[in-house]
């Protein structure tokens, strides 16, 4: 029976329960109480909203209905574990769990579980709320952080943050990779101690302090770091200060780029450029490139050296260059060949003279070639400029030396022929003197002279004077020191003229000189004096050979003919022939078998014939003796 | 003996020198014949013809020296004047050793050449006169009888008549008669003359 107190108590109790219920229902979190069996005894309004169940639906149900697998199956075991050991992972702390709604959907929830004090058997109360939104935010935050990290890691630069003391507070993956450490091996370590060579350490620390203490931008620096394996890497650094909320500098953040390879490549490039430059300087060979019509151009240092131009002057276009620096004698040819080369063959190969701004002439050889250009519209011309002044001078000196030598040899040959030549001049002088004296006597004779006799004398005197003059003229032409020149020659005519010089010499040695000249030979391009020199030399040698061999047939035949397409001249004797040991050295300069010989005759004869693109050789004469022969190519177009 | 006038034979391979020499010698009235080579001269050579040879020492084919040698081989007596160039002195010396009259270097003064030619012609005349004399003596000697020839030999050996008579086993008187006939046949005016003629006859081989 209800007492009033009871009734009051009951009323009060009822009121309390109502208040509690209102309280529970007003709570934002879902509140769920379960008994020791895990059956739900309390399920507030917030829980109803959370899970989609009415409290009536879940009372008496086990708490597991609110859990998705695998938690659902595991829950009994948790509970028993707790009861047996008094230990629970969840009691007293909040944790995030997965919860399942009536409709089966699962949502993240924050759960705090407590034991209802004094309850026996024990009951548990859980406070739960949906953390879907919060978790999404957290996830977003984490993703953001991960992305930032991945940016750091993706960055192809190393990022290192140091605190004020130089300890590493952050290093990205690239940094770890460059240094060869893991992140954990580095973070918290002293950067300078750990990653720099001792030699650079103090200076780097000083720079670190200076960077922290200053306000301005921190200079770009390049430093060597030491990696785990002890090798050095060159890092290019950009650094900024990190400040705290009060604006005080607390550390440095640096991005560093490994420029070891680049610097090495730059060094290698620089070295190879130095090598190229040195090679160009040694070879006196410059190179250039230009684009036509764009005009962008490059001249190597050596081009400036060779042209004597100030390296500050921009390269100029070749035709303009020709106008200013090519020697006037070569200018038109240069321009013509440049234009033609570019237009026709794509190649220009030309030797010409330039005049440096100070007036110094240089001989150069230029080779230029048109290269395929990238855009297909313009031409790229790449070329070399070679200073060949010294070579030209050497060639000129060699040529002059050869000419002097040739001249000496000619004089020497003349000397050997002096007796015969003296005779050859003495003969007409004798005739002249005799005619003149005869004429005087005829005129003084009683009854006067027969005019026919006088006329005969005078005509003869004239022709003999001319004869002597002709010998002297030829002699002078022969011994004169002169520059070689090429003329169109009829070789037969040349030999006939030569016999005036050669015949007296032969006659003096009682040798008959016979000419056997083939008709219809083509003209040759040659220096007449030099060819005569060769012939005289060969005839002299033949005479000497005949003098040496007593009883030989005293005749020298000079025969002309063909050697394939070339004109051949042969000097044939029937003397003793050439012993093999002499033949071996025959054309060596200064080799001679004669007492008074210079040993130059044949050596120079051969070089003369070679210079005329011909051949000089010898063969045995059938029946004994020697035949020296030389060939000369006919003039193109001559027949 | 009927003789052609002495001729100057010029041998020179040089047309101009040869022709000028002909004109020069013609101007002084000397008969001249010219030859362009030694061989040409040899082919035409006639030992009977009086004259002299003006010979170029240096010629193709047969040289002047070789011609001189050939003439010596056939005992030709024609006197030779060599004409030489400047460089030919050694050859000229050789020519002189082989009996040349003289040599003259080209070019020459006309009078020098003419003097040498005259000298050579004179020598030729002398040579020919000597030859004629010798021939006469030999002809006379051939007219002697063997006994007279014996007496001549002994007389010219300087033996006295008495000794000769003893040698020949004849009387001294007989020797005197032979001796007188020898003197007469030989046309000798004295013993000395006779001895000179015998020496002359025996001289040239």
Image (cartoon, helix red, strand yellow):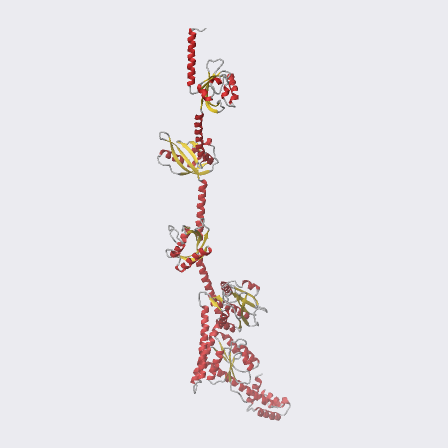
Q: Would residue A128 be seen by someone viewing this image from the given angle?
A: no
Up/down of B103 relative to A17, above or below: below
Residue A131 picture location, percent across and down: 44, 24
Q: Is residue A93 left or right of residue B48?
A: left
Q: Position of residue A435 (x, y in %)?
A: 45, 80
Front-lying residue, A468 or A308: A308
Report the number of discs: 0
Q: Quadrant of the N terminus of chain A?
A: top left
In the image as oriented, which residue stretches furthest toward the right? B169
Q: Nearer the viewer, residue B112 or A491?
A: A491
Q: Is residue A12 visible?
A: yes
Q: Where is residue A606 drawn, in percent x and y?
A: 51, 64
Give residue A353's quadrant in the image: bottom left
Is A30 rendered above or below residue A608? Answer: above
Residue at 64%, 91% in the rendered image: B170
Q: Quadrant of residue A584 in the image?
A: bottom right
B59 relative to A68, above or below: below
Q: Which residue is more in the foreground, B54 or B199?
A: B54
């Amino acid at each position: 029976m209800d007492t009033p107190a009871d009734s009051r108590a009951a009323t009060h109790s009822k009121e309390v329960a109502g208040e509690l219920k209102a309280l529970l229902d007003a709570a934002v979190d879902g509140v769920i109480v379960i008994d020791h069996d895990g059956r739900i005894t309390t399920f507030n309004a917030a829980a109803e909203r959370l899970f989609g169940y009415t409290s009536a639906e879940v009372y008496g149900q086990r708490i597991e209905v609110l859990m998705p697998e695998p938690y659902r199956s595991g829950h009994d075991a948790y509970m028993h574990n707790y009861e047996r050991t008094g230990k629970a992972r969840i009691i007293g702390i909040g944790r995030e769990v997965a919860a399942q709604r009536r409709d089966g959907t699962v949502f993240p929830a924050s759960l705090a579980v407590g034991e209802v004090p004094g309850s026996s058997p024990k009951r548990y109360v859980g406070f739960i709320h949906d953390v879907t939104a919060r978790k999404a935010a957290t996830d977003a935050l984490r993703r953001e952080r991960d992305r930032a990290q991945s940016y750091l890691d993706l960055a192809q630069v190393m990022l290192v943050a140091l605190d004020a003391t130089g300890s590493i507070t952050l290093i990205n993956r690239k940094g770890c990779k460059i240094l060869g450490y893991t992140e954990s091996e580095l973070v918290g370590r002293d950067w300078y101690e750990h990653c720099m060579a001792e030699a650079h350490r103090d200076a780097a620390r000083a720079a670190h302090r200076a960077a922290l203490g200053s306000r301005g931008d921190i200079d770009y620096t390049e430093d060597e770091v030491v990696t785990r394996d002890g090798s050095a890497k060159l890092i290019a650094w950009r650094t900024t200060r990190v400040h705290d909320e009060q604006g005080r500098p607390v550390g440095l953040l640096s991005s560093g780029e490994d420029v070891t390879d680049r610097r090495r490549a730059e060094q290698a490039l620089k070295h190879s450029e130095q090598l190229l430059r040195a090679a160009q300087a040694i070879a006196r060979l410059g190179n250039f490139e230009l684009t036509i019509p764009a005009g962008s151009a490059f001249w190597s240092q050596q081009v400036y050296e060779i042209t004597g131009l100030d390296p500050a002057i921009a390269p100029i276009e070749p035709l303009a260059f020709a106008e200013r620096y090519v020697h006037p004698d070569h200018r038109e040819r240069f321009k013509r060949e440049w234009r033609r080369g570019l237009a026709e063959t794509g190649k220009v190969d030309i030797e010409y003279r330039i005049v440096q701004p100070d007036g110094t002439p240089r001989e150069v050889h230029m080779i230029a070639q048109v290269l395929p250009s990238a855009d297909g519209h313009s031409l790229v011309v790449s070329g070399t400029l070679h200073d060949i002044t010294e070579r030209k001078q050497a060639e000129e000196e060699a040529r002059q030396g050869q000419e002097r030598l040739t001249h000496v040899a000619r004089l020497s040959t003349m000397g050997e022929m002096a007796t015969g030549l003296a005779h050859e001049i003495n003969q007409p002088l004798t005739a002249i003197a005799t005619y003149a004296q005869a004429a005087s006597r005829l005129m003084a004779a009683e009854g006067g002279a027969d005019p026919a006799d006088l006329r005969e004398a005078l005509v003869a005197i004239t022709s003999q004077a001319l004869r002597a003059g002709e010998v002297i003229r030829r002699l002078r032409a022969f011994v004169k020191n002169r520059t070689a020149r090429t003329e169109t020659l009829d070789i037969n005519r040349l030999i006939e003229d030569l016999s005036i010089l050669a015949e007296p010499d032969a006659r003096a040695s009682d040798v008959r000189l016979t000419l056997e000249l083939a008709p219809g030979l083509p003209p040759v391009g040659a220096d007449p004096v030099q060819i005569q020199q060769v012939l005289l030399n060969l005839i002299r040698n033949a005479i000497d050979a005949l003098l040496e061999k007593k009883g030989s047939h005293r005749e020298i035949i000079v025969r002309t003919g063909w050697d394939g397409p070339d004109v051949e001249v042969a000097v044939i004797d029937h003397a003793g022939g050439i012993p093999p040991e002499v033949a071996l050295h025959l054309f060596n300069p200064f080799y001679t078998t004669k007492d008074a010989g210079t040993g130059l005759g044949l050596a120079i004869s051969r070089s003369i014939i070679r210079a005329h693109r011909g051949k000089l050789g010898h063969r045995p004469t059938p029946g004994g003796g020697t035949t020296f022969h030389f060939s000369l190519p006919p003039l193109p177009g001559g027949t | 003996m009927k003789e052609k006038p002495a001729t100057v034979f010029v041998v020179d391979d040089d047309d101009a020198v040869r022709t000028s020499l002909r004109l020069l010698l013609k101007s002084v009235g000397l008969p001249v014949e010219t030859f362009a080579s030694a061989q040409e001269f040899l082919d035409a050579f006639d030992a009977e013809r009086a004259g002299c040879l003006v010979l170029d020492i240096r010629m193709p084919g047969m040289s002047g020296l070789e011609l001189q040698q050939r003439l010596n081989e056939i005992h030709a007596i024609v006197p030779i004047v060599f004409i030489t160039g400047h460089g030919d002195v050694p050859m000229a010396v050789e020519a002189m050793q082989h009996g040349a009259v003289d040599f003259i270097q080209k070019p020459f003064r006309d009078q020098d050449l003419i003097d040498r030619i005259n000298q050579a012609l004179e020598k030729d005349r002398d040579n020919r006169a000597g030859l004629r004399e010798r021939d006469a003596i030999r002809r006379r000697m051939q007219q002697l009888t063997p006994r007279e020839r014996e007496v001549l030999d002994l007389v010219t050996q300087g033996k006295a008549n008495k000794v000769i008579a003893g040698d020949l086993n004849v009387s001294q008187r007989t020797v005197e008669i032979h001796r007188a006939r020898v003197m007469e046949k030989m046309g000798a005016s004295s013993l000395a003359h006779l001895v000179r003629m015998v020496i002359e006859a025996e001289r040239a081989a």
